[in-house]
Image: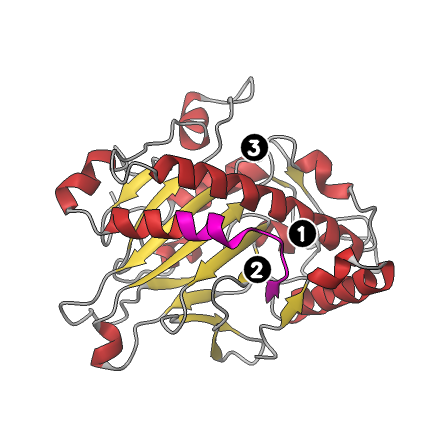
Amino acid sequence: MHDVPLIDLQPQFDNTAAEAEIVEQIAQACERSGFFAVRGHGIPEKIIEHCWQSSHAFFSLSEEEKLKIKMPFAGYPYGFAAMEAETLSLSRGEHAPPDLKENFSAGPRAIAPVGISADEALFVFSENQWPQYPEDFQQAWETCYEVMSLFSARLMKLFALALKLPQNYFDDFLQQPISALRANHYPALNKAPLPGQLRAGAHSDYGSLTLLFQQEGLSGLEILNRHKEWIPVTPCKPDIIVNLGDLMERWTNGRWVSTLHRVNIPESKTAQNQARMSLAFFQQPDWDAKIECLPTCVDDDGTAKYPLVTSGRHLMERFQSTVLN
């Protein structure tokens, strides 16, 4: 578990010394693996469970019912995506069979900035699609989205301190974030997977950070550590798994890492016959946020490894590369 340390945030509320220790733990985890888990995060467990149970009920519906809110075309960001509609490894230019999962996604209720193209506006600022059943689904999701958004912003303040920046440094990049909430459902396998087929292919996340809840005993989530070994990630709800995305690696000039991860297929038939679900919040800075090397992370010679990118275009290009037509 040293690759994915567990950090207790609760002492942060007690005294400044505890906060300094937590900030140091976060800095070390972000440099070593880009993954850690947190407890004492303050998010009410009943909010997460409400969203979790509503999501589980949705995936239990008939395929016909779920397809009523399917993403209307390849590359549309929100709604239901059926099995084998996505290949995450394509985001890295690696071809593989489609991922063995289905998912539902929702985004912000935000207005597109002035000046972006119609395609760009459609990508992030489309309307969410909500199922008719279960009846409390939309309420559960919108509440969960709100608390996850607030907590991710709180983490960014700790990240700023870990990077020797003012605590509110990232606030200007998160005025109108374009974050997304997604439930991934991995049904029990009723046939042998194709060679090289996984529940989710190896990829890195695209934004600033990801918050993940997973159920106990049915993980399959693995990260590729610095020794090029695939290591299981086992913390489960109510603890939150936190991992860095590509934008944080670019911001820090590669000092912090956006680590490759995947969801593997269990070896035993018993485990393969069990469905798995996870709930992920992908924090994404404002559409037009300019991501370039932080002042505290430039190389000794004053250079940066990565060119400037904008948050929205980076997200759009990476996401659309994974979707199968």
- Asked whether residue 4 is in view, the answer is yes
Q: Nearer the viewer, residue 245 or 5?
A: 5
Label 3 belongs to which residue?
Answer: 287
Label 2 belongs to which residue?
Answer: 242
Using the numbered discs, state the Cα–Cα distance from disc 3 to disc 2 in whole angstroms.
22 Å
The extreme front residue here reads 46
Residue segment shown in magenta = 37-50
Residues at marks 1 and 2 touching, judged by CB atoms closer than 8 Å: yes
Question: Viewer-nearest of labels 3 and 2?
Answer: 2
Label 1 belongs to which residue?
Answer: 155
Residues at marks 1 and 3 touching, judged by CB atoms closer than 8 Å: no
Q: Position of residue 182 (x, y in %)?
A: 40, 47
Please check the rendered image and state whether residue 188 is part of the magenta-colored stretch, yes or no.
no
User: Horizontally, is 69 left or right of 105 in the view?
Assistant: left
Q: Amino acid at mark 3?
A: Trp
Quadrant assignment, res 4: bottom right
User: Horizontally, is 140 left or right of 25 in the view?
Assistant: left
Q: Quadrant of the N terminus?
A: bottom right
Using the numbered discs, state the Cα–Cα distance from disc 1 to disc 2 in whole angstroms.
10 Å
Q: Earlier in the sequence, mark 1 or mark 2?
A: 1
> Label 3 neighbourhood size at 10 Å, few (<14), some (14-19), many (20+)?
many
Q: Amino acid at mark 2?
A: Val
Q: Position of residue 160 (x, y in %)?
A: 76, 51
Using the numbered discs, state the Cα–Cα distance from disc 1 to disc 3 in whole angstroms.
20 Å
Q: Earlier in the sequence, mark 1 or mark 3?
A: 1
Q: Position of residue 5 (x, y in %)?
A: 62, 73
Instruction: Say how the picture is coloured.
Output: secondary structure
Please check the rendered image and state whether residue 43 is part of the magenta-colored stretch, yes or no.
yes
Q: Earlier in the sequence, mark 3 or mark 2?
A: 2
Residue at x 27% of width, y 67% of height: 197
